[in-house]
Image (cartoon, helix red, strand yellow):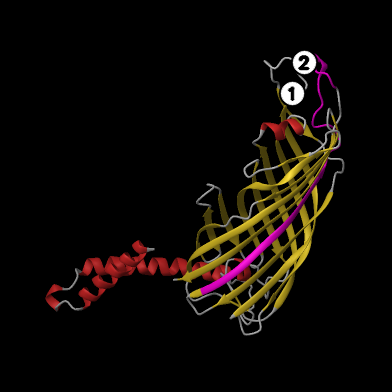
Amino acid sequence: MKRSIIVIFLLFSVVTFANQLPCGMAMPSDTVVREGKARQFFDKIGKFADEWFMRGVDTSYLALPKHRFKLSYLSDVGSVYTIIRCYDVPYYENIDARMKSNVLPKMGFLVGFRNINFGYLWNLYQHYTNFKLSLTQNAFGIELQRRQTFYAKGYIDASAIDGRLDLEAGSIAVSTTFLSGYVALNRKRFSMPAAFNQSYIQKHSAGSVLLYADYMYTNMAYNRDELITRTGGMHEIELYQTALGVGYGYNYTPNGGKILMHISGGPLLAFFNRMLVTGDSRMFLQNNNYNIIFSQKIKPQYKVYLTGRIRAAFVYNINERFLLAVYGVCNNIRFRSKDTPFHTDTQVNLDYNSEVGMHLMTWDWNAVLQFGVRF
């Protein structure tokens, strides 16, 4: 920020000094010509982009901000709540795990040119980072987002063992990657970007049916040996899902775009579900000098799962340059295994040949506070 202020001050000083020069000391004419051509070139690019973004848009409902670029300060909080149930685990019978991640805030920045935005956030104490890259229009939009967190509270309980194992901070590390897309059927009057990257101004209230398409990848890694042992040797879960859905979104503005309130969401059908479990056989081996690592793809019990999503936003356009926004999203993720994540093999002289079932459900939410400057 200090560098930006210094650069702006220097530019202002140069322009002021040039304007005060005598005629005989004016800047060379070829320099002025080059600067003029460069300015005209960038103006043409900006006008072309504005025309493309406003193509087919009802200007009585939607408008572009006067300034094309945006720089924002972001503050991010989020959490993950997960329930995992495993059945018929050797030595432990049924396992019930409840885990809730920390809600430590992250801070960062977002830079954007009209509807193209890149954001990056980090946590200064835990070294976890989030980033977001998006291209959004009224008709469609696509967003790539990656988030990291770790579980700070929770427990593992096994029916065959008295007592439960409490989870400490850092016991489980979680990273999630979302590739999300939407299509808005009422693209002429309704704008998702007006709510989530403020590249449009919604002048009158409007709603639209939304078509969703999502791809999600989640990695959950266990960092404690006692936790790995109690879950039957499992120390990493990877989940892949692809989903399609239909929902509805509405932008409410009572004063011509000064304030905007948004709500949207709908059910999703997760039709591609794959889980990869990585574990070891430490609890089955009588000889502790050997430890067999295995990875196995887990087929889902159902071909299609019903999940969902809800998003909300509040935007305050202070004036042409400054804005304040709060927005968030909540996702639901479900999986139930058809076969075993811990199928053992007699060739490695294991004591058990079990088939273990698994149920998993996760609520993943994220909220962002943004203060932006257009220029």
Q: Quadrant of residue 229?
A: top right
Q: Is residue 231 depicted above or below 139 in this figure?
A: above
Q: Which mark is residue 281?
A: 1
Name the quadrant of the N terminus. bottom left
Q: Give the residue type that dot 1 points to.
A: Ser
Q: Is residue 171 left or right of residue 36?
A: right
Tell me if 241 is positioned left or right of 59 in this view.
Answer: right
Q: Quadrant of residue 252?
A: bottom right
State the quadrant of the C terminus.
Answer: bottom left
| Residue type (three-letter) at the residue carrying disc 2 | Val
Is 159 positioned to the left or the right of 365 in the image? right
Tell me where residue 317 appears, x and y as whole percent.
55, 77
**Could you tell me if the residues under marks 1 and 2 are in contact, i.e. CB atoms within 8 Å?**
yes
The one nearer the camera, 107 or 317, is 107
Q: In front of the other: label 1 or label 2?
A: 1
Q: CA distance from mark 1 to mark 2?
A: 9 Å
Q: Residue furthest bottom?
A: 255
Asked where in the image residue 197 lies, by quadrant, the reply is bottom right
Residue placed most toward the observer, 328 or 272: 328
Q: In what element is the residue under mark 2?
A: helix
At 30% from the left edge and 67% from the top edge, which residue is drawn? 35
Q: Residue at x 53, y 62 (%)?
A: 74
- Residue 362: horizontal and vertical position, in percent? 75, 50
User: What are the residue bounds of the magenta stretch?
Assistant: 323-352
- Against 105, residue 168 (above or below) is above
Is residue 196 in view? Answer: yes
The secondary structure type at the circle numbered 1 is loop
Q: Residue at x 49, y 75 (%)?
A: 322
Can you identify the residue that label 2 sits on? 348
The residue lying furthest to the left in this view is 24
Q: Position of residue 137 (x, y in %)?
A: 62, 65
Label disc, if present, on residue 185 of the rendered structure: none
